[in-house]
Image (cartoon, rainbow, N blue to C red):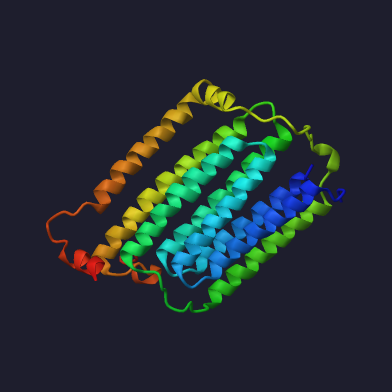
């Protein structure tokens, strides 16, 4: 059996890569890809703890399904926002879309 | 350290592939390649779910994440024609963030590997695969309210996406011209 900590380290590495992607990328779509990576790492954590702590109940899997659903909704709304922004400003580079900054 | 078994070798291979594809996604200049590498990453993670004994989640991962969501990403990337992004300027704030994140993961690895208490972990024996029936039963009994709220979130997202992308007037000339070109 693989130790639980290995799953956690993998998940932490993926979260760090995702956060760095969100921070460093200029393209808004690439930032959203980083967010997807973070949510994916969260799912790894949920399932690993389900497997090692509470395998009788399937609560971890239920919450994973909800995270996947929330990620799908987030992507739909986020990409719709990017399409609307691109239609108005002809760009989705993150630093060019700063109209809300006073 | 545990004994080297076949399972462990497979896990390390899959985990290395997952991290490598995530890094490739991060450093790829072309957004289309980033999205495709993320599809590969999601597939490797789904393989981990199969190894953990959660086949339903693994299949949902492949169909929903690697299938639907990433197709939506690729569609929008190609629709907007923003595959190529300009060269990333290395801001100092970014390197600071990178160093901080690296420290975080090193700290986490050290804490988890060296300072953990091995007896605090109740490791249940493997081999039992949870059926979809149990997940569905729990979803419709104990977690009915979160389930309904999730469905409401999906409804709001669908309506919001349609409203956000709807053309107000027939003034969509520029966008159509861009796509046709």
* Residue A17 visible in rendering: yes
| Viewer-proximal residue among B100 and A74 | A74
Q: Residue A16 appears at what percent x and percent y? A: 61, 60
Q: Quadrant of the C terminus of chain B?
A: bottom left
Q: Viewed as shown, does residue A10 lie left or right of B157?
A: right
Residue B128 in which image quadrant: top right
Residue sticking out furthest to the left = B170
| Viewer-proximal residue among B82 and B145 | B82
* Residue A100 visible in rendering: no
Q: Residue B67 appears at what percent x and percent y? A: 46, 48
Number of on-image labels: 0
Q: Viewed as shown, does residue A26 lie left or right of B17?
A: left
In percent of the image, x 57 and y 38: which residue is there? B57
Q: Viewed as shown, does residue B105 lie left or right of B131?
A: right
In percent of the image, x 49 and y 44: which residue is there? B63
Q: Residue A102 appears at what percent x and percent y? A: 32, 66
Q: Residue A65 appears at what percent x and percent y? A: 52, 37
| Viewer-proximal residue among A101 and B181 | B181
Q: Name above or below for residue B85 compared with residue A37.
A: below
In percent of the image, x 69 and y 26: which residue is there? A56
Residue B83 in which image quadrant: bottom left
In percent of the image, x 53 and y 58: which residue is there? B38
């Amino acid at each position: 059996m693989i130790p639980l900590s290995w799953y956690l380290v993998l998940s932490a590495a993926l979260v760090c890569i995702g956060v760095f992607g969100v921070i460093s990328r200029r393209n808004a779509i690439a930032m959203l890809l980083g967010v997807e990576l973070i949510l994916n790492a969260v799912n790894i954590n949920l399932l690993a703890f389900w497997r090692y702590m509470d395998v009788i109940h399937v609560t971890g899997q239920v919450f994973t399904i909800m995270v996947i659903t929330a990620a799908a909704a987030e992507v739909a709304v986020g990409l719709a926002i990017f399409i609307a922004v691109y239609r108005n400003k002809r760009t989705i580079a993150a630093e060019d879309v700063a109209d809300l900054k006073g | 350290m545990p004994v080297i078994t076949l399972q462990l070798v497979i896990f390390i291979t899959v985990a290395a592939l997952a991290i490598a594809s995530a890094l490739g996604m991060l450093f790829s200049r072309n957004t289309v390649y980033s999205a495709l590498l993320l599809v590969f990453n999601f597939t490797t993670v789904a393989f981990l779910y199969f190894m953990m004994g959660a086949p339903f989640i693994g299949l949902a991962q492949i169909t929903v994440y690697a299938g639907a969501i990433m197709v939506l990403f690729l569609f929008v990337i190609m629709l907007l024609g923003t595959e190529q992004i300009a060269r990333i300027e290395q801001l100092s704030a970014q390197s600071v963030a990178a160093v901080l994140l690296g420290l975080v993961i090193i700290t986490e690895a050290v804490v988890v590997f060296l300072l953990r208490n091995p007896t605090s972990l109740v490791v249940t024996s493997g081999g039992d695969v949870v059926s979809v029936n149990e997940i569905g039963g729990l979803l419709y009994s104990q977690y009915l309210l979160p389930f309904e709220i999730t469905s409401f979130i999906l409804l709001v997202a669908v309506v919001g996406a349609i409203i956000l992308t709807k053309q107000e007037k027939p003034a969509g000339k520029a966008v159509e011209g861009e796509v046709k070109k």
